[in-house]
Amino acid sequence: MSKKKKVTIVFDIGKTNKKFFLFDKNYKEVVREYTELPLTTDEDGFPTEDLVALRNWIKKNFNAVLDDENYEVKAINFSTYGASFVHLDQKGNVLTPLYNYTKVMDEEILDLFYEKHGSRLKIARETASPQAGMLNSGLQLFWLKYKHPEVFGKIRYSLHLPQYLSYLFTGICVSEFTSIGCHTNLWDYDKADYHDWVYEEEIDALLPPIVPTSASINTSYRNKKIKIGVGIHDSSSALLPYILSKKEPFLLLSTGTWSISLNPFNDESLTDKDIQNNCLNYMRIDGKRVKASRFFMGNEYKIQVEKLCAHYGKEYGFHREVKFDQDLYLRLIKHQAVYFRFEGIVLKRKMISETDLDSFATFEEAYHQLMIELMDLQIHTITNAIGNSDIQNIYIDGGFTDNDVFMKLMSHHFQHYQVMSTHSPLGSALGASMVISNKKTDETFLQQHYQMKLLQPLILNV
């Protein structure tokens, strides 16, 4: 009989895709499966994650691997999206739906919060969390206390989603830094403790003890000894392989629906100006801050490209074939002006009443102008995230690494940095596997797992 392969299971839970991975001892992917689970609704009819369906899917996949003669499960961990709490009563029963962080919070509750605990700007600066209602998951607890006091009174523990998934296997309630620190309004970064408002509202009593993100709980499951991780927030998890593998300071530009510049080497407190520029902090597994600056680039890009396709009579998808045209670019930047009215981006820029496409003869010309205007904001957010830190290396991952115009403009504007594209379909799952392992990594790790490619500086023939 062939020897069983020792594996770590990782459940990587996104808002849309639920992913299930098996990794071997060298972090090589052995199995990967994706699924989408149907949503349910909360008491107001607002769509949200179906916790029962998620729990059943996780247990089904876990048991299938345990039953598989090819594998010996050594460990299991979880990476998930943030801003989501599961509230448990004394007996461990779930008390509420997993409220969707896009749900709109009642204005009167928000007004009460800021009246009691300080202005939006003060709270945002001290907790490094741009104010965004339900997306600041600590406010969900305040909302429950004053909107649904009968439910709030039954809560014994409120668990961040990654820690709830761990609890399903261990029965032990814990908190950890990466979930606490992701724009929750809970953590005062300068105090390195929960914010005063958490104690004033006696919400600290509902938050379980904090343990290191690298902590694990040894348990026996069906007579098999398995190490269970405590879970990790997905953005911090995606950053982890870079932190563990690279000694020199770097910035990670994660591109997709959001463009997020992540700088784990900037420990400055956020200023009022930072908050107004949509900066925030995430937290490393050791509790240190990560300065981040974000804007809704991918969302805006999709909106504007759809309009370009309609205007120029092109099928959606045509834009993916557009290559960088140096002559076109040089011609456009001679007449620097704003032609696009952005719809979903809140960063300060010149506002115009409507997009002007009549100034461009071709789709390609208008597309280059769109990328120039998005790049202006990208430069701004990267510069904010770098701050005063000594960054020499920029790594770019996510969907825009396949965008030739974007990558050429990045190599041009950041030619004094070493800019590298990275590609890994593993997302935050790899970090979740690494955080509960004792295996050391070195400089070659990213090259092996992330298909890293150095961008050549763009020399323009001006």
Image (cartoon, grey):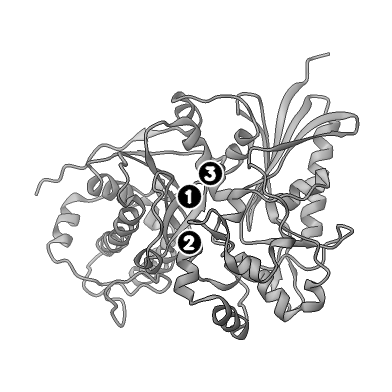
Tag shown at residue 128: 2
Q: Amino acid at mark 3?
A: Ala
Q: Quadrant of the N terminus?
A: top right
Sequence order check, earlier mark of 2 and 1 = 2
| Pointer 3 or 2: first along the chain | 2
Q: Is residue 313 visible?
A: no
Earlier residue among tags 3 and 1: 3
Left or right of 189? Residue 99 is right
Label 2 close to label 1 by CB (< 8 Å) = yes
Q: Is 131 positioned to the left or the right of 406 in the image?
A: right
Q: How far across and down, in percent of the image, does residue 55 sit?
A: 80, 52
| Residue 289 - label | 1
What's the CA distance linking mark 2 and mark 1? 10 Å
Which residue is found at the position 60% from the left and 83% from the top? 112
Identify residue for label 3. Answer: 238
- Residue nearer the viewer, 83 or 109: 109
Residue drawn at (64%, 30%) of the image? 437
Residue type beneath disc 1: Arg
- Crowding near pointer 3: few (<14 within 10 Å), some, many (20+)? many
| Residue at the image position 80 percent from the left and 66 percent from the top | 155
